[in-house]
Amino acid sequence: MDRLAGKVAIITGGAMGQGAGISRAYVAEGAKVVIADVAKDEGQALADELGADAHFAHHDVSDPAAWTSLVEDTNQRFGPVSILANNAGILRFGSVEDMPIEDVELLFRVNQLGCWLGMQSVVPTMKGNGGGAIINASSTEGLGGMANTVAYGATKFAIRGMTKGASHELGRYNIRVNSVHPGMIDTPMTRVHGGDIAMEYGASKIPLRRVGHPEDVAPLYVFLGSEESSYINGAEIAIDGGVTATHAFGG
């Protein structure tokens, strides 16, 4: 229960879905957690549930000034940030031919730019305190292509690439940077695109014959944030029920 004792974590998109699962797991393992999200009601409710070791911060990951304030506040509230879980992300479907440019730009700003700004913002603190762990949420669509997710996949491939580059830049400071690649996970973000029917269809395409849940993903974040993974850097880890063991999901 103390695998993250003494750690201070920022979890973006931490109010719901995978982020809420990660927040709960981190507090259970002894970390102090800042739940950073645009979802005020859900984020505050989760922080209230988790008690004194959690704090909710309303946060837009695409805003550089918001990142500066978030890191400063976290450092003062709980101590130096030692883990960043860049979990925030959005999903939009659309073909190359028809997808509105506004959706493409929104995907870039939230998924890719948000991840970049998060890494950039925590590095000074981590360098000054002997290291840290950055965990970037990519996707199976960051490992292989799928129709109607070209713009989304572009951001997730970018996160995969940024992770590898950052792992080389930051490894000398004992800052480890790894990417996590979930497959189909049952969350509010995925359910909005088809509900139970989508979940059932997805399960039929997965070797384990079930979709994942936030509780399946959170232990990987605990491991990557803990000292148990002290020699894992620049890795890409799929957590997808076996989808990418052969072709990309839907391939």
Image (spheres, rainbow, N blue to C red):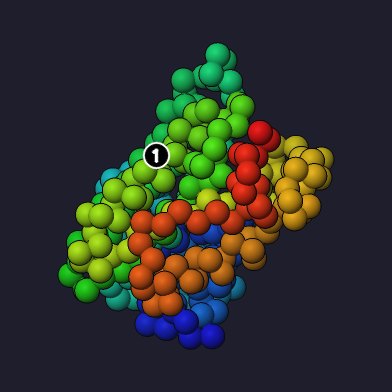
Which quadrant of the structure image shows residue 122? bottom left
Left or right: 228 with respect to 22? left
Q: Amino acid at mark 1?
A: Ala
Q: Is residue 241 visible?
A: yes
Q: Residue at x 54, y 85 (%)?
A: 1
Neighbour class for label 1 at 10 Å: few (<14), some, many (≥20)?
many
Q: Is residue 72 visible?
A: no
Q: Nearer the viewer, residue 201 or 114?
A: 201
Q: Nearer the viewer, residue 104 or 40?
A: 104
Q: Residue furthest front?
A: 246
Q: Residue furthest top?
A: 97
Task: Measuring from the top left, give residue 107's x and y in whole percent.
Answer: 47, 34
Task: Measuring from the top left, give residue 49's x and y in whole percent.
Answer: 59, 73
Q: Residue at x 53, y 66 (%)?
A: 220
Q: Judge whether 125 appears above or below 251 on screen.
A: below
Task: Measuring from the top left, give residue 222's x and y in whole percent.
Answer: 50, 71
Which residue is the site of mark 1? 158
Q: Judge whether 73 appears above or below 94 on screen.
A: below
Q: Dot 1: what SS?
A: helix
Q: Looking at the rendering, in which quadrant would you find the C terminus?
A: top right
Q: Residue furthest bottom?
A: 2
Q: Residue at x 59, y 56 (%)?
A: 239
Q: Nearer the viewer, residue 231 or 135?
A: 231
- Numbered marks: total: 1
Q: Judge whether 47 appears above or below 156 on screen.
A: below
Task: Measuring from the top left, give residue 121's x and y in whole percent.
Answer: 26, 55
Which quadrant of the structure image shows residue 70? bottom left
Q: Residue at x 41, y 57 (%)?
A: 235
Which quadrant of the structure image shows residue 175? bottom left
Left or right: 212 with respect to 197? left
